[in-house]
Image: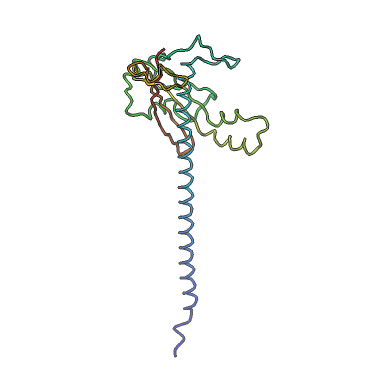
């Protein structure tokens, strides 16, 4: 048997196997990194959605507080100022009022522009009830009690990239039916005895890959 032609074959085979194993290892790293990035994106979307829901809840709470009367410093409602809020901000162009922060990492009308089907001409003419912008992380951090641990404060700092914004439009007369809640007209009373409002809310992730989730809801309050 002539073994001269087989000299170096084991070395070549080892190099080929090494190359194949390297390619397989690299592929696994790429796949793993892709899955990790996908999980991060999913988590960011979920958190941004929750922040958008917070925007709707805060807008609805704004309407309720003004309808029933704002709270005084003694945590008592001032019923003399209770009533249905009007569209007071005329010629509004989408700029939000910053409530608990100053500088922002995004355009001030980014939430307004996130509703492409909005009747802007009507909105500009009639005005809106209110438009506010809040930093979610700062809000969470300031709500902590003094005994909050470092881990909780660190988590709150990580939420500072999230903002929630809402603006409210008074739509007009609407049917209302009350069922014994603290906000009602009469028991099972129907007809155009309610006032409808539309709340537009946005959750904003201001990180490098910016994410905006826009939601809306309709609230009907009874006329006095």
Total labels drawn: 0
Residue closest to the far right: 147
Occupied quadrant, residue 1: bottom left
Q: Residue 215: where, in percent of width, then height?
A: 40, 31
Q: Residue 98: where, in percent of width, then height?
A: 50, 22
Please, is residue 137 above or below residue 71 in the view? below
Q: Residue at x 54, y 14 (%)?
A: 77
Q: Residue 117: where, in percent of width, then height?
A: 32, 28
Please, is residue 67 above or below residue 158 in the view? above
Occupied quadrant, residue 85: top left
Q: Residue at x 54, y 24 (%)?
A: 100
Q: Nearer the viewer, residue 3 or 48?
A: 48
Q: Nearer the viewer, residue 222 or 138?
A: 222
Q: Residue at x 38, y 23 (%)?
A: 198
Quadrant (top left, top right, bottom left, bottom right) of the C terminus: top left
Residue closest to the far bottom: 1
Q: Residue 213: where, in percent of width, then height?
A: 42, 34
Please, is residue 174 above or below residue 212 in the view? above
Occupied quadrant, residue 156: top right
Left/right placement of residue 91 relative to residue 35 reads left
Please, is residue 11 above or below residue 145 in the view? below
Left/right placement of residue 140 relative to residue 64 reads right
């Amino acid at each position: 048997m002539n073994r001269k032609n087989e000299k170096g074959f084991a070395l070549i085979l080892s190099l080929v196997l090494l190359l194949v194993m390297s390619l397989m290892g690299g592929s696994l790293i790429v796949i793993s990194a892709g899955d990790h990035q996908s999980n991060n994106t999913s988590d960011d979307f979920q958190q941004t959605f929750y922040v958008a829901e917070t925007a709707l809840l805060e807008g609805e709470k704004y309407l309720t507080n003004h309808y029933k009367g704002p709270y005084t410093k003694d945590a008592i409602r001032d019923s003399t100022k209770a009533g249905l809020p009007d569209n007071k901000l005329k010629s509004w162009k989408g700029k939000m009022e910053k409530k608990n922060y100053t500088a922002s990492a995004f355009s001030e009308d980014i939430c307004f522009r996130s509703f492409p089907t909005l009747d802007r001409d009507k909105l500009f003419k009639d005005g809106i009830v209110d438009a506010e912008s809040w930093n979610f992380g700062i809000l969470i951090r300031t709500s902590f009690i003094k005994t909050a641990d470092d881990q909780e404060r660190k988590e709150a700092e990580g939420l500072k990239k999230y903002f929630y914004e809402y603006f409210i439009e008074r739509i007009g007369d609407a049917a209302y039916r009350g069922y014994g809640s603290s906000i009602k007209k009469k028991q099972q009373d129907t007809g155009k005895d309610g006032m409808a409002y539309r709340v537009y809310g946005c959750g904003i992730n201001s990180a490098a890959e910016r994410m905006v989730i826009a939601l809306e809801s309709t609230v009907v309050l009874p006329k006095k």
